[in-house]
Amino acid sequence: MQKCGMLSIIVPCYNEADDVADFYEQTSAVVGALLSDGTIDGFEFLFVDDGSGDDTFQIIRSLSLENPNVHYISFTRNFGKEAAMLAGLEHCIGDYVVIMDADLQDPPELLPKMFAEMNAEEGCECVATRRTTRKGEPLLRSLFSRLFYKLINRISEVEIVDGARDFRLMSRRMVDSILALKEKSRFSKGLFVWSGFRVRYLEYNNVERSAGTTKWSFWKLVKYSMDGITAFSMAPLQAASALGLLCFTGSLLAVLFFVIQKLFFGIAVQGYALMICSIFLLGGLQLLGIGVLGLYLSKIFIESKRRPDYVILECCLAEESMSGIAAGENDKA
């Protein structure tokens, strides 16, 4: 297998004190094997502490003191996984980059297979993973996840594979293309696909967390799915417009029907219940349309403020990326 250059492993962390040491130990063993057989000629771990409230940062810092290949970025508060992934992509220096969760739901033993898949096809810039099962997940969460993928793939301009993970190996060329996208409301699963590079998918059975509990509540997932839909589709706006047109047409036909009844058949239209129901129906549809419009306007509002995606409290990075941090911070000021 050909030598691939340096590998950067980006690890977003939020309250992962129970997992991060085990993750580092297991992943280091796999990376050491890749280094020994010549698949890579160097590596770095880049942990991004997303404002954890436990001992995650202290553990990461101790790992950095023990190993010069371990670097970290610590945020002032919790900015979300998307911001943590972005920070890792902006400040990593590897020729190839992999994003992994610290809870070991992204099996480190897949890394050699990912490199093999990338080398197996010329022009492949990314090897992504997807879960073929959702064993261990709550039934309701799994149901809504599947519905989300079906919905977004019907209405969006990109196709997001059901079960696709953020766990993926990317070339530097692809990473640079992702970083060129400067939007604030990021939905990385869509951005990875939107970039258009050739991707191979590696399937595996779902792996449950090694410890702790998931940080993604049901409502956080709902909000994240709405971010994805509004980022890659105008269908909600089109649907609201279509509903408005349908209601207007229906109301016009109903008025015409009642006028004909009165003029030609002498039948009087009775009842306030029908009128009240009609008012509530039209009012509800108007509120729905305004709400959908508000979602898109909120995106414009967020983009126009140009706030930084994250604020760094402390970092320990390779010299090659220090100038990038200074430039990035100046850009965000």
Image (cartoon, rainbow, N blue to C red):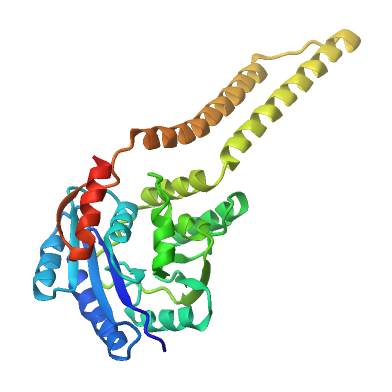
Relative placement, left or right, of 202 versus 240 is left
Q: Image quarter for residue 316?
A: bottom left
Q: Is residue 4 visible?
A: yes
Q: Position of residue 75 (x, y in %)?
A: 19, 52
Q: Nearer the viewer, residue 194 or 179?
A: 179
Residue under the image location 76 percent in, 16 percent down: 255
Quarter holding the C terminus is top left
Residue under the image location 37 percent in, 44 percent down: 184
Relative placement, left or right, of 25 versus 280 is left
Q: Image quarter for residue 298?
A: top left
Total marks drawn?
0
Relative placement, left or right, of 97 versus 128 is left
Q: Is residue 133 visible?
A: no
227 up-or-down from 73: above or below: above
Residue under the image location 45 percent in, 69 percent down: 134
Q: Nearer the viewer, residue 46 or 292?
A: 46
Residue occupying the far right of the picture: 264
Q: Position of residue 231 (x, y in %)?
A: 49, 45
Q: Position of residue 195 (x, y in %)?
A: 50, 58
Residue under the image location 47 percent in, 31 percent down: 294
Q: Position of residue 175 (x, y in %)?
A: 40, 62
